[in-house]
């Protein structure tokens, strides 16, 4: 279930490379690995970066994914520092093939929702504000809110 329109309208966005964004939308990736934390909790618009992780795309057999676009959203429930034990234990949820190192955070993600089609837009680093124009498009393409295409 989506949060109220008032929450969606103020929600920030996060750029994530493909195929990681797609894996979040499919519910296969419930933890995003970041090198920074945030106090923010709540709905986040999911934006795909303009570049992709080619090795991961091949590994997961995910090609021709949208780049440089808003593709959906998710709830950021918590941010927890990784330690070596958590890294290994939670690997099935973060899917990262790399090794743990100090300074990594587990962004705990739930309730992914896919827009009915991608909305082309520039991204930014960190959590970023969504322009009114892009927000209106995103809202109209949410399956539980927007009208039919």
Image (tube, grey):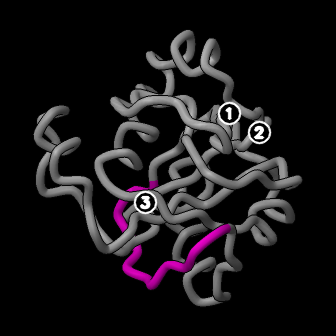
Numbered label attached to residue 108: 1
Does residue 20 lie above or below 127 as drawn?
above
SS of the residue under disc 3? strand
Where is residue 110? Give x, y as percent: 64, 32
Q: Which residue is labeled 2 in the image?
A: 79
| 49 drawn magenta | no
Local crowd at mark 2 within 10 Å, few (<14), some, or many (≥20)? many
Q: Which residue is labeled 3 in the image?
A: 71
- What range is drawn magenta here? 115-126
Counting residues from the start of the chain, the first of labels 1 and 2 encountered is 2
Verify CB contact (< 8 Å) between mark 1 and mark 2. Answer: yes
Verify CB contact (< 8 Å) between mark 3 and mark 1. Answer: no
Instruction: Specify the quadrant of the image occupied by residue 118.
Output: bottom left
- Closer to the observer: label 3 or label 2? 2
Query: Residue at position x 59%, y 63% from top?
Result: 14
SS of the residue under disc 1? strand
- Classify the position of the C terminus by image quarter: bottom left
Counting residues from the start of the chain, the first of labels 3 and 2 encountered is 3
- Classify the position of the N terminus by image quarter: top right
């Amino acid at each position: 279930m989506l949060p109220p329109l008032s929450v969606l309208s103020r929600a920030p966005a996060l750029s994530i490379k493909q195929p990681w964004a797609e894996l979040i939308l499919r519910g296969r990736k419930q933890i995003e690995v970041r090198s920074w934390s945030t106090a923010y909790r709540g709905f986040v618009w999911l934006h795909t970066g303009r570049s992709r992780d080619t090795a991961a795309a091949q590994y997961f057999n995910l090609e021709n994914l949208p780049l440089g676009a808003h593709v959906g959203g998710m709830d950021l429930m918590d941010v927890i520092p990784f330690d070596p034990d958590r890294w290994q234990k939670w690997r099935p949820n973060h899917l990262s093939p790399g090794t743990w190192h100090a300074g990594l955070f587990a962004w705990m993600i739930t309730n992914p929702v896919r827009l009915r089609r991608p909305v082309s837009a520039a991204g930014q680093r960190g959590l970023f504000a969504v322009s009114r124009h892009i927000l209106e498009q995103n809202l109209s393409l949410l399956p539980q809110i927007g009208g039919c295409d």
